[in-house]
Image (cartoon, rainbow, N blue to C red):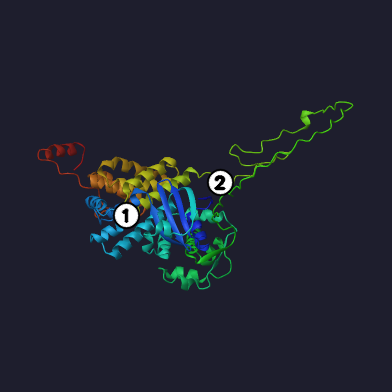
């Protein structure tokens, strides 16, 4: 089981696997679980995950198909049968509905595999019949799965950084690229861009300039077409899969040989004088150990020290702001799956890493927006929105959200002040009906009976009507 060690992350490896028409199992050990991707002829055939949220039963609960009681009853019935088969046998879903839900789940597994950190990656070559015989009955649409996942994945910055780290990479498009991808949901703009790609080798920057796409969108297009087989890498180093390690050679038994008879040698004549070897220690450079502590062999050092090469950007640890942005991306992904509590935790992690720079504005704003939905978090929501308004003093949205929260709580004066400030910054910002920049302050309550005379006397004393 050779361990796969490449510096590129999953999208580049998917393009390489498709181009090599690889067949085997790719094991990804990630910080939230282990995922297994099965390949045949360069196409994805199935995916598995041991993450609790990516089990088919739990997935159906989140989609409202099952409740917890039904899931427990299904698990206790029909031992040996797969969950997908049980829901069909019970009449909860048709075969077609089951396959649609399963395809949706596998897309979620691939999306999380792209967006989560890969701790270890292992490639197990070989046919899939032994490990995946039952699951091969499900026909996975590789093209649709890859297309949908690459469109949803929030990995634009990572893709741009990867392509910049490989300036020698050049791709060649299929001669009939547009026709080959006609079954995919292409927009007119994207179809026109594909028609511009010819069979000459093109780099990512050249494709961006040719199509007029921004750098991030061009990087996403190149990675998607590579994984679909529409582009093939023709220049640069292809991320290769290691070959299986050959078995150790069998050792043949060595026959025992009869000991040879000892020969008597004539004694050597004694020298006329005993030689003396003079060693001047400062003329002999000390020898470094030829092995690391882990056993890896080293070259002997040169006589003169050489300067260490500069550390490249791809070897540097990601900065705090980059890690914070990664947590923000995770939070947005959780929101798409209705996992609000996990999104809030991801935003709080992003703010811990980088909460004072202008780049933290989006994290504070999204955190405030999520907190205003919980009445118990009203104070914390206001605090988050106030920090967001401080980081971007020209943004109207934090003020509008604070006004909405004050309006909901019945603090009309505070709400009016926040809405007025939001409209000053952006007259098009949405505020509740009846509130506008020109709207007068809410009228003061009428004086109670018995207070009108006293108030009139006070106004007369100060010369007011």
**x 51%, y 65%: residue:** 212
The image position of residue 364, as x and y in percent, is 38, 45
**Is disc 2 placed on a helix, strand or loop?**
helix
The image position of residue 183, as x and y in percent, is 41, 71
Q: 308 or 206: which is nearer to us?
A: 308
Q: Earlier in the sequence, mark 2 or mark 1?
A: 1
Badge 2: residue crowd in 10 Å (few <14, some 14–19, many ≥20) = few
Q: 185 or 24: which is nearer to us?
A: 24
**Is disc 1 placed on a helix, strand or loop?**
helix
**x 51%, y 55%: residue:** 160
**x 64%, y 38%: residue:** 291
Q: Is residue 396 visible?
A: no
Q: The C terminus is located in which quarter?
A: top left
The image position of residue 324, as x and y in percent, is 44, 45
Using the image, tell me which numbered label, if any, was put on residue 56.
Answer: 1
Q: In this view, does 7 lie above or below 206?
A: above
> From the viewer's perspective, is 117 left or right of 304?
left
Badge 1: residue crowd in 10 Å (few <14, some 14–19, many ≥20) = some
């Amino acid at each position: 089981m050779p361990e796969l060690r490449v510096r590129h992350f999953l999208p580049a490896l998917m393009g390489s696997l498709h181009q090599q028409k690889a067949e085997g199992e790719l094991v990804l050990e990630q910080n939230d679980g282990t995922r297994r991707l099965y390949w045949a002829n360069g196409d994805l055939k199935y995916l598995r995950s041991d993450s609790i949220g990516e089990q088919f039963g739990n997935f159906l609960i989140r989609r409202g198909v099952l409740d917890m009681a039904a899931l427990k009853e299904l698990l206790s019935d029909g031992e040996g049968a797969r969950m997908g088969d049980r829901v069909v046998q019970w009449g909860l879903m048709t075969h077609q509905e089951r396959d649609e839900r399963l395809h949706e789940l596998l897309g979620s597994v691939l999306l999380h595999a792209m967006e989560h950190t890969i701790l270890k990656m292992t490639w197990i070559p070989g046919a899939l019949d032994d490990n995946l015989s039952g699951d091969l009955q499900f026909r996975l649409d590789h093209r649709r799965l890859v297309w949908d996942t690459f469109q949803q994945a929030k990995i634009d910055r990572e893709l741009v950084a990867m392509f910049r780290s490989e300036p020698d990479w050049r791709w060649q498009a299929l001669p009939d690229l547009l026709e080959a991808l006609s079954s995919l949901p292409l927009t007119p703009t994207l179809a026109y861009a594909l028609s511009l790609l010819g069979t000459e080798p093109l780099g990512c920057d050249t494709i961006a300039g040719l199509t007029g796409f921004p750098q991030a969108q061009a990087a996403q297009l190149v990675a998607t077409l590579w994984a679909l087989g529409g582009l093939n890498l023709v220049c640069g180093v292809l991320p290769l899969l290691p070959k299986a390690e050959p078995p150790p050679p069998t050792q043949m038994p060595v026959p025992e040989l009869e000991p040879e008879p000892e020969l008597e040698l004539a004694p050597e004549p004694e020298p006329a004088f005993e030689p003396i070897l003079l060693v001047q220690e400062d003329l002999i450079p000390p020898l470094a150990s030829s092995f690391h502590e882990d056993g890896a062999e080293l070259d002997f050092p040169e006589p003169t020290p050489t300067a260490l090469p500069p550390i490249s950007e791809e070897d540097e640890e990601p900065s705090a702001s980059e890690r914070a942005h990664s947590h923000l991306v995770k939070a947005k992904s959780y929101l798409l799956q209705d996992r609000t509590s996990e999104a809030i935790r991801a935003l709080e992690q992003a703010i811990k890493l980088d909460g004072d720079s202008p780049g933290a504005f989006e994290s504070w704003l999204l955190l405030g927006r999520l907190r205003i939905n919980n009445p118990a978090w009203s104070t914390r929501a206001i605090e988050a929105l106030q920090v967001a308004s401080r980081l971007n003093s020209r943004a109207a949205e934090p003020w509008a959200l604070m006004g909405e929260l004050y309006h909901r709580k019945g603090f009309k004066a505070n709400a009016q002040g926040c809405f007025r400030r939001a409209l000053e910054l952006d007259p098009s910002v949405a505020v509740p009906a009846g509130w506008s920049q020109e709207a007068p302050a809410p009228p003061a309550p009428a004086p109670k009976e018995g207070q009108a005379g006293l108030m009139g006397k006070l106004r007369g004393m100060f010369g007011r009507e």
